[in-house]
Image (tube, rainbow, N blue to C red):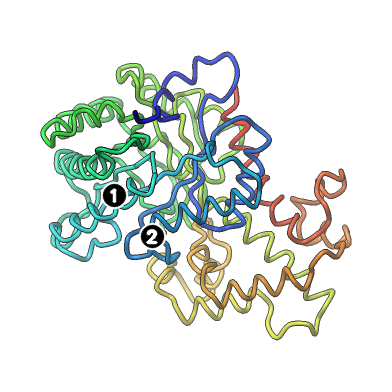
Amino acid sequence: MAQQNPLQDIAHWNAREAGFRGIPSICSAHPLVIQAAMLRALKTDAPLLIEATCNQVNQDGGYTGMRPCDFRRFVEEMAARTGFPTDRIILGGDHLGPNPWRSLDADEAMEKAEQMVRAYAAAGFTKLHLDTSMGCQGEPIALSDQLTATRAARLAAAAEDAVRGTDACRPVYVIGTEVPIPGGAMEELSILEVTKPDAAIRTVEIHAGAFEAASAGEAFNRVIGLVVQPGVEFGNHNVIDYVPENAEGLSASRGRIPGIVFEAHSTDYQSRQALRRLVADGYAILKVGPGLTFALREALYGLDQIATFLYPQARKQALQTVAEDLMLKQPKDWEKYYEGSAADQHLQRHFSYSDRIRYYWPHDQLTAAVDELLDLLGDAVIPETLISQHLARIYPRIRSGSVAPKAQAIVIAAIDLVLEDYFEACRS
């Protein structure tokens, strides 16, 4: 008999007297981010939800070079290193749909998306976000709710087929038609339109019918989440903060869809107070990705400056220089997203909230530069005055003695500053 999915009853977590009322969704494939997340989760009794996106990980390898089975193995290897119990790990697939193949016609793209979802389900990913909201070649950018739901149901049926006849934990699903693009908005933002309550309810109803028509009605009983826009987002230059009053109607509408919580995307860079209020208002799944690798980049660049000062002749190139050279030689992951003058684009390549530099960390050249930096600093005690100068957010933890003044510990601590906000916001 298949075991119960630990997220199946997440809609009831908010009624708990103690424990976690929501869950952070760690959307990253960077080993240091995964390590930091495991170390943070070890301090709690909560499950750890780690999600891979369709662009990061798919049957063709994605930009990390990993297939779903490879990603699972990678996470389990990280768990062995950190001593994190694998039975507390929930693997999720984010934005699963035709997005990586939008340049193909819809039939081809959906066939590829089906193959991907099957691979995710077969590899033991038990939380699947179905995102078929984008148009393919010759289609509008945004599709109708009915077509989106029909395609999502097709993918759910494929996932169910991949685990049929096994005792594997059955996946739970997240649906929605008002889905933000992976990785945040591209432009500077001012005002966001919050999802209308009736639109949220109608999305669930349309999907219920589409799942039934696709002979996936039983799978619809495991739809636990709906992606909505509560008024949070980030672009290249700014962040839109959560204003609970603007989403009162949407938050209240969750009472009309029992068994389903809201999933909030692009919550990166929100304050702990805002995250806590999101959970209290029913947005029980908080996605975070670029905010974690933004913190990683801040720490690495700070250490880069420190290493340049302490060991000026030790490296041929500083880390930031290697990153800049690589991004200029291979611009496909940023050039469509960063606008403005050459100076504007230079700033955004390294310091944008969208953090598209994260696509380059797996590249051999940049991985080698990071390894060289961390090896150079090694286990040496870094003067706390330099930490104050270049890594001010970590400085209080260095002074308090809770973080060792050493390179690896500093990187993990920088990521943990973000993770702590999420885990504490989800705790009752």
Give the crowd class for mark 2: few <14, some 14-19, many >=20 residues within 10 Å. many
38 above or below 112?
Answer: above
Q: Nearer the viewer, residue 149 or 214?
A: 214
Report how many numbered discs are placed on residues in the image. 2
The kind of residue tagged 2 is Arg
> SS class of the residue under badge 2?
loop
The residue that mark 1 highlights is 117
The label number, if any, that marks residue 67 in the structure image: 2
143 above or below 359?
Answer: above
16 above or below 227?
Answer: above
Distance in Å between CA atoms under marks 1 and 2: 11 Å
The label number, if any, that marks residue 271 in the structure image: none
Quarter of the C terminus within the rendering: top right
Would residue 360 appear left or right of 11 to someone viewing this image? right
Q: Nearer the viewer, residue 187 or 258?
A: 258
Q: Residue at position x 35%, y 42% from top? A: 128
Q: Position of residue 64 (x, y in %)?
A: 45, 64
Q: Residue at position x 16%, y 62% from top? A: 137
Quarter of the N terminus within the rendering: top left
Q: Position of residue 339 (x, y in %)?
A: 43, 68
Q: Which tag, 1 or 2, sits closer to the chain's start?
A: 2
> SS class of the residue under badge 1?
helix
